[in-house]
Amino acid sequence: MSVIFRDILPADNPVMAAIIRRSIEEFDVPTEGTAHTDPTTDNLYQLFQTKGSRYAIAEEDGVILGGCGIFPTHGLPKGCAELVRFFLSPAARGKGLGVKLLEKAYEFAREEGYTSLYLESFPEMTRAISLYEKNGFEYLPAPLGNSGHISCTVWMLKSLFYEPNR
């Protein structure tokens, strides 16, 4: 498997929108109040031109496998960005790509000066939740910021400070 990681391009918009929507449907979670109905999902390249944001694409032999981004969601605490639109195609799951995309997101976030990452998800997305737990995300009792994704019921936060004892 020869996977490359690169910044999102305009031509990636329809493929990533399809991966995101199919994933949300696959896990049978609400479509309203999620990335499924968020109009920016169809224009990820444009969205990630926002200052303080970045989006990584995982690609193999010209095939997009998924992506993950960071975004300065309105209302988040100072120094915090949101981990957003983190989705892999079904064929790409279970191969360690999720961890590599998370590492890209951490790298991007640190380069942008963020000290923590926040995310929103669903308990039905068990493999994703497990990945977040294993990578130091901790549960929050309520949402932060104003993502507009009011249907999400899992909220997590990770400090990006290096942890030398781990």
Image (cartoon, rainbow, N blue to C red):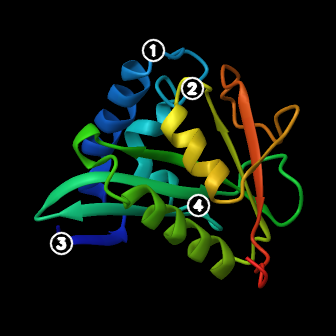
Mark 2 is on which residue type?
Thr
Residue under circle 4? 50
In the rendered structure, which disc, 1 or 3, sits on the residue that comes first in sequence? 3
Residue 151 found in image quarter: top right
The reply to whether discs 1 and 2 touch (Cβ–Cβ < 8 Å) is no
Find numbered disc 3 in the image and state the secondary structure of the residue it sits on. Answer: loop
Q: Is residue 131 above or below residue 5?
A: above
Label 1, label 3: how far apart the Cα atoms are: 31 Å
Q: Tell me the crowding category of disc 4: few under 14, some 14 to 19, or many 20 or more residues within 10 angstroms, Cα based.
A: few
Determine which residue is flagged by label 2.
34
For label 3, the residue is 2
Q: Give residue 149's position: percent from left, percent from top.
A: 66, 28
Front: mark 1 or 2: 1
Which of the labelled discs sits on residue 28, or is there none?
1
Residue farthest toward the front in the current orientation of the protein? 165
Question: Residue 166, image x and y in percent?
Answer: 73, 76
Give the residue drawn at x 52%, y 41%. Answer: 128
Give the residue at x 39% y 54%: 67
Residue 72 in the image: above or below residue 106: above
Q: What whole-number distance in Å separates the C-alpha atoms at marks 3 and 4?
A: 30 Å
Local SS, label 1: loop
